[in-house]
Image (cartoon, helix red, strand yellow):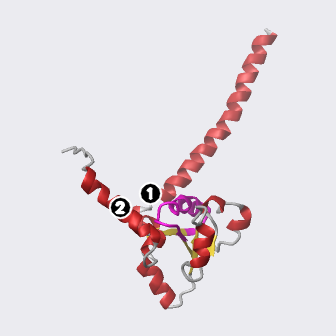
Amino acid sequence: MKKGLQIILGLILLMALAVPAYADDAELTAKIDAVVSKGPDNANYFVGADDIYMWLKLKKTDFFVVDVRADADAPGRFKEAHIPGAVYIPYNQMFKPENLKKLPKDKKIILVCNVGVTEGLGIVPLRMLGYDAYGLLLGMAGWQKDFFAADYIRSLLDAPKAKNYPIESLK
């Protein structure tokens, strides 16, 4: 009888511990949904190079550019060329407390990478933390004349023409 009671109490304790974990997951899922579901109404949280260029020309101060390139050559590339006023925080270090402290919550945060892909990794989490985060469409390839990655993007866009990848239709 004692062993049976211990098992029942153990199961109750296990269930009690599991409920808060589930509640945390449900809360997190709701936060993610709150951000992601608004994406289509907000250009999927991307801005174009023309927008940033105009803000710079107008000397707007309500945005903050963060270069998040993280490849081995990124620090050198940032030193060579970056959007005026940008700070450098690699995306894989973005969520360290000391780096989050550098980001203003009262400005648009514009993340920039090489081709506009890895910058997307930070948009939703930053928004969940209360930042007004966006990515630069096509990254530095969409900003810098003769940027090395622009040819890479062109080759990716040409691949479907040459390969004729299969597609399906639900018609």
Foreground residue, 127 or 19? 127
Residue 71 location in percent, x, y?
Answer: 58, 61
> Can residue 106 be seen from the camera position used here?
no
Quarter of the rendering occupied by the C terminus: top left
- Of all residues, the one furthest to the top in this rendering is 1
- Of all residues, the one furthest to the left in this rendering is 171
- Asked if residue 108 lies left or right of residue 6, the reply is left
Residue 99 location in percent, x, y?
Answer: 69, 67
> Can residue 1 be seen from the camera position used here?
yes
- Asked if residue 98 lies left or right of residue 133, the reply is right
Q: Is residue 87 above or below residue 114?
A: below
Crowd class of label 1 (few under 14; some 14 to 19; many from 20; radius 10 Å): few
Kind of residue indicated by mark 1: Ser
Q: Is residue 112 above or below residue 55?
A: above
Residue 7 location in percent, x, y?
Answer: 74, 17
Which residue was labeled with disc 1?
37
Which residue was labeled with disc 2?
155
Q: Which residues are magenta?
A: 111-132
Alpha-carbon span between mark 2 and mark 1: 32 Å
Please give the name of the residue rendered at 61% of the width and 39% of the height, measured from the top-left corner. Answer: 22
Residue 4 location in percent, x, y?
Answer: 75, 12
Please give the name of the residue rendered at 57% of the width and 45% of the height, measured from the top-left corner. Answer: 26
